[in-house]
Image (tube, rainbow, N blue to C red):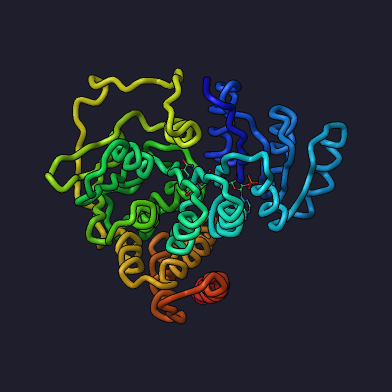
Amino acid sequence: MQQIKYIAILGSTGSIGTQALEVIKSHPQLFKVKVLTAQSNVELLIEQALSFQPDEVVIGDETLYQKLKEALHQTPISVKSGMEALCEVVALPEVDLVLTALVGFAGLKPTLAAIKAGKDIALANKETLVVAGELVTELAKQNQVKILPVDSEHSAIFQCLVGEIAPIEKIYLTASGGPFRGKDISFLSEVTHQQALKHPNWIMGAKITIDSATLMNKGLEVIEAKWLFDLSVDQIDVIIHPQSIIHSIVQFQDGSMKAQMGLPDMKLPIQYALSYPDRTQNNFKRFNFLDYPQLTFEQADTKTFRNLALAFEALNKGGNMPCIVNAANEVVVAEFLKERIGFLQMSEVIETCMAKLDFIAQPVLSDYFESDNQTRIFAKELVTSI
Ligand SMILES: NC(=O)c1ccc[n+]([C@@H]2O[C@H](COP(=O)([O-])OP(=O)(O)OC[C@H]3O[C@@H](n4cnc5c(N)ncnc54)[C@H](OP(=O)(O)O)[C@@H]3O)[C@@H](O)[C@H]2O)c1
């Protein structure tokens, strides 16, 4: 009989967070929610708290604390707000596993707090590894903490490695190519955020959906893979696979390749990360070969979708460069969603930030916060001047 796992979900109101709650709800004998958090969607957080009865809830936006507190005042649920509270709740003694399903650089502090408290991490928040992968993975090693990937590509690699002791020769991260696959520069110069938000295969939060359209998501995943699987840059390749059935591939030193496949449904990698090392029965729709008579592959077009090339460049350069790319990208995606900047200008701003901001070869934790802050200020100035 498996022991019940007590889970803290950071970002429970988002795309990953809500799907994780569906998984948890269908396995009450395996999982129990201890902590739920959101940034500003207080209505959904209240609904989730009443339904899942966690010990603690945290709202990031402190102005919404009172509303949350009042809504839950007849329950024993403890209510908190702000970043410091996020760092506290991940360290609660009853929590076994922290699912980092919040978006962006904001994930770094609470992830570090959870690792320091010895909690295993189910990591969806790739930006944390992009910004400070070396520091985070080193701290996880020191604290004997497992980092279990939730991203479907990294979950695929992780699943392919179960039972293997042979070294990896290389990995192939698959990418759908997003809604603008095959389009040229003149087409991209006119696209709107509504078009960019229509991903062909996945329904996800706004930021990652735009990142998928620009191929920055794949770039961030390349950096994430480097740290999760301890690889060098030339061991990581990207291949466009428009059907999103093969989620990624490992090639071993004898040339043998293992792929993990299935329908595109994030609930599967979420469930695997929560139940690891076990696999758990579920009623998710199964793959049928005859629905997909052709699985196809293409080279990624990094001349048109420059963000992928910029991410590789940042990884090659190392130091705080991935942190600069991440911060600039967070700014331009937010500005693109507000229609203040065009699709192609996103790469231009990121590239200028990479060229102009201070490079630090061996950053310490405070350097990441400083770089993130500096980059956001500079990127916003660049957007304003466009
Ligand atoms: N969605 C996917 O299918 C998918 C797949 C692979 C990886 N990921 C990764 O998983 C992470 C979450 O993605 P998502 O698509 O689920 O995002 P999302 O739908 O935008 O949800 C983000 C969650 O984080 C909370 N949040 C936002 N900003 C925050 C802040 N500054 N501090 C604390 N909490 C904050 C949000 O709260 P509010 O709702 O109150 O705003 C929400 O609960 C990202 O790193 C993404 O790259 C997602």
Residue beneath the point at 12% across and 44% down: 255
| Number of on-image labels | 0
Q: Is residue 30 above or below residue 355?
A: above
The residue at the point 75 percent across, 52 percent down is 81
**Frontmost residue, 378 versus 265:** 265
Above or below for 155 versus 61: above
- Horizontal and vertical percent position of residue 48: 69, 33
Horizontally, residue 345 falls left or right of residue 44, namely: left
Q: Residue furthest left?
A: 254
In screen coordinates, is 107 left or right of 220?
right
Observer-nearest residue: 145 or 168? 145
Residue 280 in picture, x, y percent from top left: 45, 23
Q: Position of residue 307 (x, y in %)?
A: 35, 62
Q: Is residue 378 in view from this perspective?
A: yes
Give the image quarter of residue 96. top right
Residue 188 in percent (x, y) is at: 35, 57
In the displayed structure, 349 sits above or below 17; it is below
Residue 341 visible, this angle: no
Q: Residue at x 54, y 60 (%)?
A: 105
Q: Nearest the camera: 269 or 243?
A: 269
